[in-house]
Amino acid sequence: MDQREEQEFAEYFTARRDAVRRTAYLLCGDWHRADDLTQTAFVALHRRWRKIRDRGALDAYVRRSVLRAMIDETRRPWRRERHVDAVPEQATTATDVGESVATRSALVGGLAKVPPRQRAVLVLRFLEGLDVASTAEALKCSEGTVKSQTARGLATLREVLGDSVDDLRSTS
């Protein structure tokens, strides 16, 4: 890459790394794994930087790379070890601390128990705000698959959270 391309990549990386890391965390529930997934996605992007013509599609490319890396990692045998809960981020105000930590912990804990493909659909649809078509494109599947995985993922999340669902609804 020439100097101008390196500068463009560095600017994109600086602008988007935190958002990509948050998405990766929501997918896997572990900040250390999220860092690994983020790094994998940006390394893949860097390798293909010259070949990407539509700079408006960079977010979609990185998102797809994170999703693929997460799904690949869950298939590896050494990733079947016991999950350790991550420390939740701090809330912005003192009055929100209890509710924010409880909600975030319940949601992240629940998402961790949802199968990877369903978790990916839920994160993209409800936390990233993508519509069905964009989610299908990111996951390289049909819109019907996205809809069925959304329904199954929500059912699994409700089952896992149990009574916590009512608590989450009352705090929102």
Image (cartoon, rainbow, N blue to C red):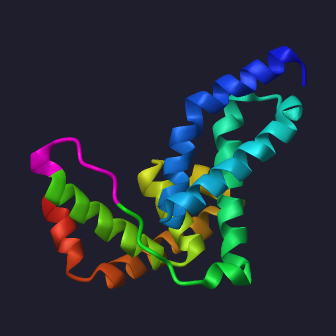
The picture places residue 58, in percent across and down from the top left corner, at 69, 36
Q: Is residue 121 above or below residue 77?
A: above
Q: Is residue 15 above or below residue 167?
A: above
Q: Is residue 125 left or right of residue 95?
A: right
Image label count:
0
Residue 95 on the magenta segment: yes
Q: Is residue 134 above or below residue 146?
A: above
Q: Residue at x 48, y 65 (%)?
A: 29
Residue at the extreme left of the image, as rendered: 95
Q: Residue at x 59, y 84 (%)?
A: 81
Between residues 108 and 122, which one lies in front from this camera angle? 108
Question: In the picture, which quadrant includes the N terminus?
Answer: top right
Question: In the picture, which quadrant includes the C terminus?
Answer: bottom left
The picture places residue 111, in percent across and down from the top left corner, at 43, 71
Look at the image and tell me whether residue 7 can be seen.
yes
Residue at the extreme top of the image, as rendered: 4
The picture places residue 127, in percent across and down from the top left corner, at 43, 53
Q: Is residue 144 left or right of residue 151?
A: right
Look at the image and tell me whether residue 137 can be seen.
no
Residue 166 in which image quadrant: bottom left
Q: Residue at x 52, y 52 (%)?
A: 23
Q: Is residue 49 left or right of residue 12?
A: right
Q: Residue at x 46, y 74 (%)?
A: 112
Residue bounds of the magenta highlight = 88-96
Between residues 169 and 39, which one lies in front from this camera angle? 39
Determine the main secondary structure of the stretch shown in magenta. Answer: loop
The picture places residue 106, in percent across and down from the top left corner, at 30, 70
